[in-house]
Amino acid sequence: MTRARMLAGAVMALALSHACMGAAAQEGASATLLHPMFQDHAVLQRDQPIGLSGEAGPGDVVSVALGPQKTEVRAGADGRWRAILRPMPAGGPHALVVRAGTATQVVRDVQMGDVWLCSGQSNMELPVWRALDANSEIASAAHPRIRLFTVPQASAVTPQAQFGGPVRWQPATPDSVRDFSAACFYFARELQKTVDVPMGLIQAAWGGSRIEAWTSAAALRAGGGSDEALDVLALYATDTPAALTRWGHHWEHWWTTRQGATPGDMPWRADAPDTGWRTAPAALGAWEQWGVPALAGYNGMMWYRTQVTLTAAQAARAATLELGPADETDMTWVNGMAVGSRYGAGEPRRYPLPRGVLKAGTNTVVVNVLDTYRDGGLAGPARAHALTFDDGTRVVLDRGWRYRQAAGADEPPRAPWQAAAGLSTLYNGMIAPLGDYALRGMLWYQGESNTGDGAAYAARLRLLRDDWRARFGAQVPWLVVQLAGYGMPPSAPVESGWAQLREAQRRVVAEDPRSGLAVAIDIGDAYDIHPPNKQELGRRLARVARHVVYGERGLAPSGPVARSASRMPDGGLRVAFDDVDGALVATGANGPIGFELCDAAHRCDYADVVLDGRHVVLRGKRAADATRVRYCWADGPVCTLRDGTGLPAGPFELSLPAAEVPR
């Protein structure tokens, strides 16, 4: 081998090992011409026009070849280019070759197949290693025609063209599958049994995220109700201190006008009275562990306050407030001025302070912490909280913290720039960088973080669906996982934000023929919000896809679906079901349980139920004045109605026709 060839090989190896945009081989002059979605092992959507994009020199002629197809386009003044190739059938491998000037990029092992976007919160993010039978599943995960792509977790206040970290396509192997979404992987593995084409899986998920974070700012604004927060978000991108001040006023207005507010109660002020404040443990940490009975199971807001003394010289310096992690969300003030807010249970806070906030003498730091799940609070130790100055010095907030439990159950507004709980932040950082990459369908498993306002979820889900279709294609199918059961079953009818959200999912899916619902109510876990049986979930999602996406009309998408509720002449009530394989059956008892009859005053009672083919007949003391029928209406209900396939009937609420008044 010549010295020149040895040197060229070394340069190539180094470039490949450090390529932050994947393993795309480069020939000729080193350059990255393609968008990072287009790399070795990529899957492109079959049977659709093939959109390719990237960057070259301004005005450069870009030649593109994929398999037998070739075309040329010219890059724009900003260097960006886009080419459209004719649809190609399933198959591969193909080579994708792009040239511009002296630069060439070659992408190998490109497959034509079906591409799926799998998104949502922690139950979509949950990796294979945390699902059932993980060791065996990982060991046998050799599926070279399933390709995996994980979008790096990143939030942004404006739409991003690039990902927040390195990305690559990987064939499914024991190593690559281990940390990939279990629900997404098991879905593709099951679907490939009947749809024998390569599958490309794009995971874009973030645990604890709210649906608003995944929706674009334009869609949220069109949906109404978020204009003020969106205005603050736009300001945050250009003038962060001004946005913090404006949001602080918004938050403070909420506090003083919320239901049950005490006039004059403004705990963030430096001159707020000390009434009601208590000394917090020196180690801080989860308030559930403080040994205070009232806090042992408390989820809600907690106020923290401490003080620090500064010299005039220190107060005049540029400074940053450092705080330990706050579980989950904080809103922070210094001397009565809002200086920061962030979501993230394990993340320390660093808030640069505007000039003039600090003063010589006593300075007051106030932190409001919101916790909605399990342990909550401001982490210690004392040395984790400090003021750091531009000369490298650090003053620890070691005078001790006082705390005050916040009355009321209302949750405060979330700062719109927060990563998983903000507005459009995950859309900007994780969906926008995908461009308009062609998809076969989208899988959505999210909602747990929105159960505090389940009744509003339907409108938000429609916004998200239409928003993503505007980006990826108006005809792209949308498959939704209905929330699994979580929590202990109730002994009497209850109101439930989880049930309201499931009903929103059911109704939104039912109104759109290109949407499908995977019922998961029976595969939840009363003690774990992350049920591990993702294999069965994958099977159910694949079944939904076969019906909705691939048109298997002889295959019902899920289990029995309630169609209508009506009154019977003898005073009973009848619920009719569609998509029943054989007849309805009940498990564990002579008849199904979990049906409720509710009146106009929102009083509900369990009903007595008998099966009648593809119907159920309900009777009970509220039958005469019932206005609604509910089924499996709880956070974690017991649902026993199925059909011959063994698939469950999902939760629902149906209105009843008005009862006839005797003349």
Image: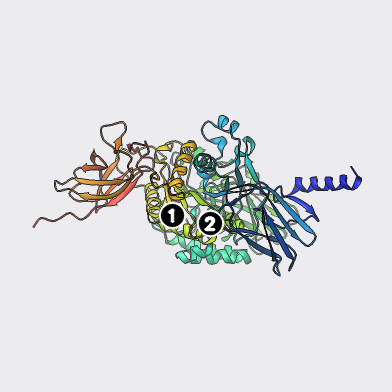
Residue at the front extreme of this rendering: 68
Residue at the right extreme of this rendering: 3
User: Residue under circle 1?
Assistant: 514
Q: Nearer the viewer, mark 1 or mark 2?
A: 1
* Quarter of the image where the N terminus is located: top right
Q: Where is residue 581 in the image (x, y as percent from the top left)?
A: 33, 40
Q: Position of residue 635 (x, y in %)?
A: 38, 43
Q: Where is residue 480 in the image (x, y as percent from the top left)?
A: 45, 49
Residue 447 in sight from this viewpoint? yes
Q: Earlier in the sequence, mark 1 or mark 2?
A: 2
Residue at the left extreme of this rendering: 663
User: Residue under circle 2?
Assistant: 422
Q: Which of 289 and 480 is in front in this view?
A: 480
Q: What residue type is labelled 1?
A: Arg
The quadrant where residue 351 appears:
bottom right
Q: Which amino acid does label 2 sit on?
A: Gly
Q: What residue is at 30 percent from the left and 35 percent from the top? A: 586
Label 1 environment density (alpha carbons within 10 Å; few <14, some 14–19, many ≥20):
some
Residue 267 in sight from this viewpoint? no
Total labels: the figure holds 2
Q: Where is residue 259 in the image (x, y as percent from the top left)?
A: 39, 58
User: Quick check: 144 left or right of 302?
Assistant: right
Distance from Cα at disc 1 to Cα at disc 2: 28 Å
Label 2 environment density (alpha carbons within 10 Å; few <14, some 14–19, many ≥20):
many
* Quarter of the image where the C terminus is located: bottom left
Task: Give the secondary structure at mark 1.
Answer: loop
Task: Give the secondary structure at mark 2.
Answer: loop
Q: Nearer the viewer, residue 659 or 258?
A: 659
Q: Which of 633 and 514 is in front in this view?
A: 514
* Colouring chosen for the image of the structure: rainbow
Q: Which of 622 and 650 is in front in this view?
A: 650
